[in-house]
Amino acid sequence: MQPGDITLVKGLPSNLDAERFVLGSILLDDSAFIAVAGMLSAADFSLETHRRIFGRMTDLNARGEKIDRVTLANELMKHGQLESCGGLTYVVSLDEGLPQLSNLDSYVRIVRDKSILRRIILTSQKLIERCTMGEDEPDEILASAEEELLKLGEARAREALISPRQIIDEYDGGLNAFLDPSKRIQGLSTGFTKFDEKTGGLHPGELIILAGRPAMGKTALALNIATHIALKNGKTVAIFSLEMSSESLLTRMLCASARVDSQKFRAGYLNQDERRLLAAKAQEFTQAPIYIDDTANTNLMDIHAKLRRLNAEHGLGLAVVDYLQLMGGRGKFENRVQEVSALSRGLKLMSKELRIPILVVSQLSRAPETRQGDHRPQLSDLRESGSIEQDADIVAFIFREEVYKPDRADLRGLADLMIAKQRNGPTGIIKLVFLHALTKFENAAADLEESEEAPFE
């Protein structure tokens, strides 16, 4: 049984007259095909006959040929589909008794709306079958349901290409506001002055990769940025930790913010002033828009579903994932490189869809250790996937030379934040200070603040 027949037998939503009017409008004036093709595909037609006819119209247009009764009938005949589409009689009847062409947009909208309703019904039926079979975990089915319905929403929200004039006309404040730098959308401040100057802050839709070797302070720096954005900017921050527990993360953020030695906190050796500082900060954190998820085996779909819910309920300013290589991909992959590539691409698409910056912590390969003399990381050191570099808008490395030279007292606490790639700005090296007792990074003193202007190598 053909898909179109199934639609009719099951009584799924459809409007055959609207479909026929769309096809007939194209036969009367084939210039209308471009407008229709931008909104509909062959799969949007409920009747298999109409799917085939629209498909052949697409072929004619692709070859630059005119679409009319004769060319369409000939194209159907070449593919052996003319008789299955009702013969020449049906093709000729498509444009008979057609209302005014000015209604074409309405016909297209009706066809598209019915198509969306059918897809919702079919998706729901598949979910019911999965729930009835009980072969998958409930959380997995729920995440899959949200993902499928989101795709349907994206299909409905698909928009046409727009011109520069439309972009400026729709910009809040018009041309003057569009050209005024002070009224442009500003990125979120990270709290690190030189980094903000080079990047303009973290912008919606950006994927930021923060990478480094173990013990360099990747998690500490990511938490410092998340805390600043939540406490100082008042933006909602979601933190996904695949390595540390939520209690450990909160302890780190509290001690760093209150400037209390984290080791003394864990050991229980705190004086009265330190307890007072921690209590005050703890009260501040209870009111802060910070949400932590420490699920160990989380995957891209889980993160996507949780972020969508959080965004709908509270709005969202930043998402942090710690760290990329601990995430698992869904589906089958030939190797880990393909899996990590799919994860990085998925995170980039997620940042664009939710219109938030996503800060992802990533491990580096062991290559820096094997280099003689200079252990500074390079883009080629990104572990398991070159697509991480391709998908990211910003790639930054955190590097502390003292890790390799512990005997050098002059290197104690010095750190480099190396912007190795920036899609919309310069690269360079930014000097920071690492406070070991607080597991906290801070801006360097004035004499260390000058960042290198030469491109990062």
Image (spheres, rainbow, N blue to C red):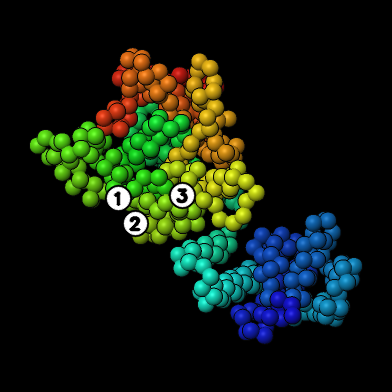
Work out whether residue 229 can be spotted: no
- Residue pointed to by mark 1: 289
| Image quadrant in which you'd find residue 341 | top right
Disc with the residue nearer the chain's start (2 vs 1): 1
Relative side of 62 to 225, left or right: right
Examine the rendered structure and indicate whether residue 306 appears above or below residue 422.
below
Mark 2 Cα shell of 10 Å, populated few (<14), some (14-19), many (≥20): few
Q: Secondary structure at mark 3?
A: loop
Examine the rendered structure and indicate whether residue 325 appears above or below residue 154.
above
Query: Label 2 to label 1, Cα distance in Å?
Result: 8 Å
- Residue 186 appears at what percent x and percent y? 40, 39
Mark 1 residue type: Pro
Q: Secondary structure at mark 2?
A: helix
Q: Are marks 2 and 1 in contact (CB under 8 Å)?
A: yes
Relative side of 416 to 442, left or right: right
At 45% from the left and 65% from the top, the residue drawn is 139
Q: Hey, which residue is sitting farthest left in the picture?
A: 272
Q: Nearer the viewer, residue 70 or 6?
A: 6
Q: The N terminus lies in which quarter of the figure? A: bottom right
Mark 1 Cα shell of 10 Å, populated few (<14), some (14-19), many (≥20): some
- Residue pointed to by mark 2: 314
| Label placed on residue 275 | none
Mark 3 residue type: Arg
Q: The C terminus lies in which quarter of the figure? A: top right
Query: Label 1 to label 3, Cα distance in Å?
Result: 18 Å
- Residue pointed to by mark 3: 355
- Residue 40 appears at what percent x and percent y? 66, 65
At 53% from the left and 17% from the top, the residue drawn is 372
Mark 2 residue type: His
